[in-house]
Image: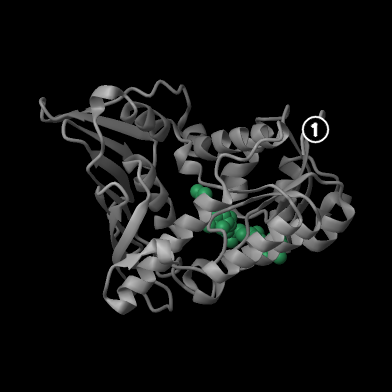
């Protein structure tokens, strides 16, 4: 859809992540995007985002399907609970707009394939948000990994250990705590560690061994998962995630070559570098000049800037359906490995 003018954007879902992160990132790229319409069934969320984005009342929709019919849009961002993603993508594809969907693309590979059929049938661009690849720390880590003397990553490990309160894990109030809404810690939280470790290792995961379980809360989704990956090039890595391990939210992702280590902290807020000859991790100065809030939003802001630039120029978005389906297939494989107590070859999924 290359356009002379900037992209007219509709938001489907105006909840937590839109208010915390998306909105400012989108308002920061007025040369590429104008938020023209928004949709959310919750009036408070609609009003908050509508006011911040200066949306006239006629373009604030309770029902996103009315927005898709009435508003003049080139693209939508979908940021709704996971079980609604497939349905919302299919409706947006039928309306002929480009689609940027929050992760995960769907709650199952079957749903993912249905929505991909619709995207293909209606020939609309489709992109998935993998924002933590765009944080200052991750971008610099990937640059350091490409340096000749750093070597090839042989092993890696990623952690996302969080401590939810009982309120945050109440399935009656929180969709993330309910299987019917596509919740669970592996698909919601470790989704990010899975693409981060795979990108840092630089080779696709081929085999998945895992245990995905519920140990801490009374709900029907997973709250702990340990995964072991074997990559195409023979490298091995692990992902550990939980919602029942409080004590300071922790998320790190690190890889080791024969000579070096590289560790992303806080999904790319900070970075450490290890020259094994020195035997000490050193902080890397990221020189981003961002305050704390802007640093928290940087992944989304940089991801949106890259994605909307690609769409405006008629190019493929940087994170494609293939990336997103592959990430979902690793999560699916982890569930299968748990029930079958064996390693799963993801090329068979
Ligand atoms: N990439 C990231 O770092 C990141 C971080 C947080 C959340 N997310 C993703 O963003 C999405 C939303 O998460 P959240 O934390 O904002 O959830 P949330 O519950 O805070 O917000 C979801 C919003 O969707 C709205 N909604 C529900 N049904 C709708 C419909 N039919 N049409 C329009 N809006 C509808 C709800 O009213 C709510 O306002 C999820 O996919 C989640 O995984 C991504």
Q: Position of residue 76 (x, y in %)?
A: 72, 49
134 relative to 337, above or below: above
Residue at 68% in and 34% down: 27
Q: Is residue 9 left or right of residue 143?
A: right
Figure check: 179 above or below 186: below
Residue occupying image coordinates x 40% and y 70%: 166
Q: How many marks?
A: 1
- The residue at the point 27 percent across, 42 percent down is 254
Looking at the picture, the colour scheme in use is one colour
Residue 59, given in percent of the width and then of the height, sits at 85, 50
Q: Position of residue 204 (x, y in %)?
A: 38, 49
**What is the quadrant of residue 121 in the picture?**
bottom right
Quarter of the image with the N terminus is top right
Crowding around mark 1 (Cα neighbors within 10 Å: few <14, some 14 to 19, many 20+) is few
Q: Nearer the viewer, residue 282 or 3?
A: 3
Quarter of the C terminus within the rendering:
bottom left
Q: Which residue bears the numbered disc 1?
A: 3
State the image coordinates of residue 316 (x, y, percent, origin top left): 63, 40
Residue sitting at x 32%, y 71%: 337
**Displayed-image quarter of ligand 1:** bottom right
In the rendered view, does 50 fall on the left or right side of 275? right
Occupied quadrant, residue 29: top right
């Amino acid at each position: 859809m290359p356009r002379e003018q900037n992209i007219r954007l509709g938001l489907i879902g105006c909840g937590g992540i839109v208010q915390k992160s998306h909105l400012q990132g989108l308002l920061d790229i007025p040369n590429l995007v104008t938020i023209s319409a928004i949709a959310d069934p919750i009036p408070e969320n609609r009003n908050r985002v509508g006011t911040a984005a200066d949306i006239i009342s006629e373009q604030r929709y309770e029902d996103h399907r009315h927005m898709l019919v009435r508003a003049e849009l080139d693209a939508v961002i979908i940021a709704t609970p996971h079980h609604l993603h497939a349905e919302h993508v299919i409706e947006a594809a039928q309306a002929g707009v480009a689609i940027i969907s929050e992760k995960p693309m769907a709650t199952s590979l079957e749903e993912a394939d249905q929505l991909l059929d619709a995207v293909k049938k209606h020939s609309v661009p489709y992109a998935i948000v993998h924002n933590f690849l765009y944080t200052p720390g991750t971008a610099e880590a990937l640059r350091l990994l490409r340096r000749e003397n750093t070597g090839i990553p042989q092993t890696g490990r990623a952690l996302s250990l969080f401590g939810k309160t009982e309120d945050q894990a109440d399935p009656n109030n929180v969709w993330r705590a309910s299987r019917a809404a596509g919740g669970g810690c592996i698909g919601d939280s470790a989704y990010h560690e899975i693409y981060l470790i795979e990108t840092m290792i630089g080779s696709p995961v081929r085999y998945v061994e895992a245990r995905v379980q519920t140990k801490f809360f009374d709900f029907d989704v997973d709250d702990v998962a340990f995964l072991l990956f074997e990559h195409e090039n023979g490298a091995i890595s692990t992902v550990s995630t939980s919602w029942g391990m409080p004590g300071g939210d922790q998320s790190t992702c690190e890889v080791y070559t024969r000579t070096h280590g590289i560790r992303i902290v806080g999904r790319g807020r900070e970075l450490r570098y290890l020259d094994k000859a020195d035997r000490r991790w050193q902080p890397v100065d990221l020189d981003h000049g961002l305050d704390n809030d802007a640093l928290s939003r940087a992944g989304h802001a940089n991801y949106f800037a890259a994605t909307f630039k690609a769409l405006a120029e008629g190019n493929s978005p940087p994170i494609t359906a293939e990336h997103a389906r592959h990430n979902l297939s690793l999560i699916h494989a982890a569930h299968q490995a748990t029930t079958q107590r064996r390693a799963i070859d993801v090329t068979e999924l």
